[in-house]
Amino acid sequence: MSGQSSKRIWIYDTTLRDGSQAEGISLSIEDKLRIARRLDELGIPFIEGGWPGANPKDVQFFWRLKDEPLQQAQVVAFCSTRRPGKKAADDPMLQEILSAGTDWVTIFGKSWDLHVTEGLQTSLDENLAMIRETIAYLKSCGRRVIYDAEHWFDGYRHNRDYAVQTLEAAIAAGAEWLVFCDTNGGTLPHEIARICREVMDRLGDRGRDDLKFGIHTHNDSETAVANAIAAVLEGVEMVQGTIDGYGERCGNANLCSAIPNLQLKLGYRCLDPQRLPKLTETSRFVSEIANLAPDSRAPFVGLSAFAHKGGIHVSAVQRNPLTYEHISPEAVGNHRRIVISEQAGMSNVLAKARNFGIDLHKDDPTCRQLLQKLKEMENEGYQFEAAEASFELLMREVMGDRPELFELQGFKVHCDRGPGMTHAWATVKVTVEGQNILEAAEGNGPVSALDAALRKALVTFYPRVSDFHLTDYKVRIIDGSSGTSAKTRVLVESSNGVDRWSTVGVSTNIIDASYQAIVEGLEYGLLLQRPSEKVAVRV
Amino acid sequence: MSGQSSKRIWIYDTTLRDGSQAEGISLSIEDKLRIARRLDELGIPFIEGGWPGANPKDVQFFWRLKDEPLQQAQVVAFCSTRRPGKKAADDPMLQEILSAGTDWVTIFGKSWDLHVTEGLQTSLDENLAMIRETIAYLKSCGRRVIYDAEHWFDGYRHNRDYAVQTLEAAIAAGAEWLVFCDTNGGTLPHEIARICREVMDRLGDRGRDDLKFGIHTHNDSETAVANAIAAVLEGVEMVQGTIDGYGERCGNANLCSAIPNLQLKLGYRCLDPQRLPKLTETSRFVSEIANLAPDSRAPFVGLSAFAHKGGIHVSAVQRNPLTYEHISPEAVGNHRRIVISEQAGMSNVLAKARNFGIDLHKDDPTCRQLLQKLKEMENEGYQFEAAEASFELLMREVMGDRPELFELQGFKVHCDRGPGMTHAWATVKVTVEGQNILEAAEGNGPVSALDAALRKALVTFYPRVSDFHLTDYKVRIIDGSSGTSAKTRVLVESSNGVDRWSTVGVSTNIIDASYQAIVEGLEYGLLLQRPSEKVAVRV
């Protein structure tokens, strides 16, 4: 059971469904598609995409993936059992899940008698019929079914026999996976282990060794990851969770911790070992899309996860990392940071430069200047993690290889609101190759007006700016407790239809910050056109 | 062993020492004293206050507590074993720890042979002497000693016999507590349990049943709390951790999760049951002092820990909370929140109205209208989850009880950037009680200029607006892939120095969205002043 070399654990990601139910997260269909593609690249085999019955917009997510399918992942639609007293075939919610057109569906059903009688206000027998008939119906429509036993552990503790009956109903109807869900998040690891073991033994005694079990935990006790591991050690083969542990209340099991623990320490195979190093970038990507600050203290993938403070042990770490690090940071795509030391930033900078195909030596004075400039800018609030194009421009500037494409003389932005109307326009004045150009444009708001005016001003000399468009625009207030005087950081993503690149701007003035990010976006896009340059464009 | 009713677990808080080593935390002596007094009030029995040998300022913390002692907690000074090759009495670091004048001291020593030979660069025997002699010396000076076995689990796995010898050296010298430290944070709960059990059995076999053991875990695997619990279930009686899990890298074991798990679920006694409800306020206090944003998703004490979304289960929660909550929020001083969201059904709305002292019935047409308006606005991008004041204003509007405090005639916002300068100002025109008022103001940026102009315009009729200030300002782009034409949602938090409230605004124009949020913030603040109104202010 434990430590079997390379036993497969099936990772089931519910970031787009359970994760998106978290407070403060609101994902558009585009957001979900971008995340799904990243999860697909990471090699996650199951991606739960939404609950079409509850959120009508969710079905469009599935339809879009029909047009442009993922490379390897199975996309799963989520739904409840049919309503009490209804026929499965007559339940509109189930029609919604079918219209999603996925091969796999996940059905959740009540395991706890109290939830049946008080929550659903129906009989225990009817609930069993609901489970059985819903699964049978969906199978008859050609779907493969995963069954989520909701409130499993609480239900088992309160009425063990009934809980097992609900599971047996799912098994009889042909569910291929039976997932134990700790929906309230209150169960501790030793209890998870005990209950999984008992149930699996009990079902195994009846000759059902072919059954496959999963675990779905929540972090209300701060043990979601430990709970998932405890279940796997008892023979569970699927782990449901989310990237960065996002989810309602205290979140779901954090896959960014569960996967490395299972794979690097216990010898299970969750992801293709070649793809595991993509974990950190996937984590950062999802937090960016969700517009949430990444947790620097996050295990494995956090910025501080392998940050060593100065002193004696820093040299010890470098000589023999395993004396101070539980895993090698590179195994999950993270890196060691030495804090309060010039050498720390240095290795970051060297690594980053290498990424861009620039071979800097740490003794190179340019490297030191770059590090210095980087630290200054980061102190002002710049963050280059999600704005690699800006970082590259900075590097080029320090290396003396950043051509000045135009000189900004100034801009004015106006925003008028009167009865029944709001109007925004901007005027921009630039100098290109000695010539002054003044242009004005309107926009939905001050930032789009400024963007439009700037392009108008540049298009005569740089016709290609009309190929660029902004594909994302994010604003983060760096010190919100200063109210409207806080510094603003704007992240902009641009595209020329083929490549995408991100740039950043910081200022107490949101228009100014937006301008910086936009103008660097244009600058970088124009650099991409120079045939002699080979520039890394990975965002 | 497990679940013994009211077996005492000694909580040892190292927020002020290990916790303060976290990136981004810098505690002054005053900060530490304030935290120590709060921990004392909570009833924490051991408070590790610092490492005088490493941080000379730390000794002042201990001296201040000599003058104004805590009520019940033992303050502990932390230190390493003596230097290799030195006599304990001659080691200046040990003199520092003695000068702290505490009854208790904690000494950490190396358990892992590799650390002794490569890290300390001394012999295995010398390390045993260092442990033995340091503890013996401090005892001879009248101190009671806790021994932290550093890198215990890794050391035990690599060289079990040597690790046990280090522990025996500490025992022989008279250490009263032996604490197993998972210093690298890489050990998983089942291994923690196994190793604790083996060692405690082995020492028990030698007739040492009087020994008391502790556990000190780190969160690099996201299992620090689970690890602490696993150790306690094997008979360990002290748990070392920090408030909010603060600490280097991924942090220490979070006492705000460990304590409620142990006390409320496993029947151990960590704190006086009357004081356990102080846990949440202690957590918030420490994050305030540390100047870190509290983690809203934190188990037990987080703002979202008991936040319920969605229609069906909200009514179920209110009827029978234990169907959806693993513990009662009040047990740790937290409270349930019903979150307003797209999935809001009638029951959410009713629950919220009750919070505001408004008794709506679900058959009331007002309720239906409110729900309708809510859904429309949420489709446009409004999110009331984090903007409860805006929600209340909306409710009042539907109920015909939203007084018009002023009428906006219009505003103009300007933003100029020229060589070496950026300038922002705004003009606002309002009508109050039939009188037209026009005011202008400058600001760091367009939004702060608009805010300042608006207050200037209102202050003559509503002098109290000068008491309000913005404490937080957040911007979220709702559909970022529309680039700068995307809808913007602005969330603003305001305060009058006592209460805090949040409001929201949505528009494709960021200035407009900010205006809406700001003006609702002012409106709500003014409503709070009306003596006949009892308005809920909990954000």
Image (cartoon, coloured by chain):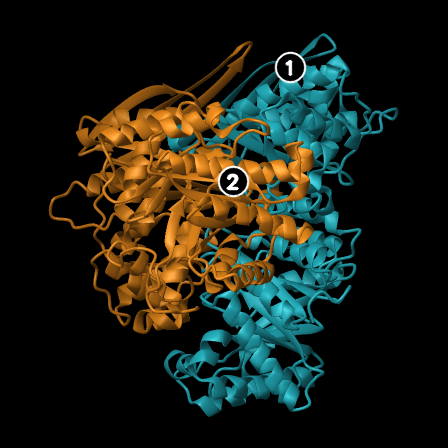
Chain colours: A cyan, B orange
Q: Is residue A517 above or below residue B185?
A: above
Residue B498: % across, % down: 23, 38
Q: Is residue B528 above or below residue A182?
A: above
Camera-side residue of A106 and A159:
A159
Q: Residue extending furthest top?
A: A434
- Look at the image and tell me in which quarter the C terminus of chain A lies: top right
Q: Which residue is mark 1?
A: A430
Instruction: Specify few, some or many for label 1: CA neighbours under 10 Å numbering under 14, 14-19, or 20 or more.
Output: many
Q: Nearer the viewer, mark 1 or mark 2?
A: 2
Say which residue appears at 73% left-offset and 53% top-offset: A42
Residue A86 visible in the current orientation:
no
- Say which element carries label 1: strand
- Residue located at (70% from left, 39% from top): A321
Mark 2 packing: few (<14 Cα in 10 Å), some, or many (20+)?
Answer: many
Measuring from the top left, give residue B290's x and y in whole percent. 40, 34
Rendering coords of residue B428 (x, y %): 33, 26
Q: Quadrant of residue A233?
A: bottom right
Residue found 23% across the figure and 51% down from its top = B536
What numbered label is drawn on residue B509?
none
Q: Which of B320/B150 is in front?
A: B150
Do the residues at pointers 1 and 2 share their chain? no
Circle 1: residue type: Val
Is residue B70 in view from this perspective? yes
Residue A516 % position (x, y): 60, 24
Which of the numbered marks, if any, corresponds to residue B132?
Answer: 2
State the SS at label 2: helix
Q: Give the mark count.
A: 2
B42 or A203, nearer to the observer: B42
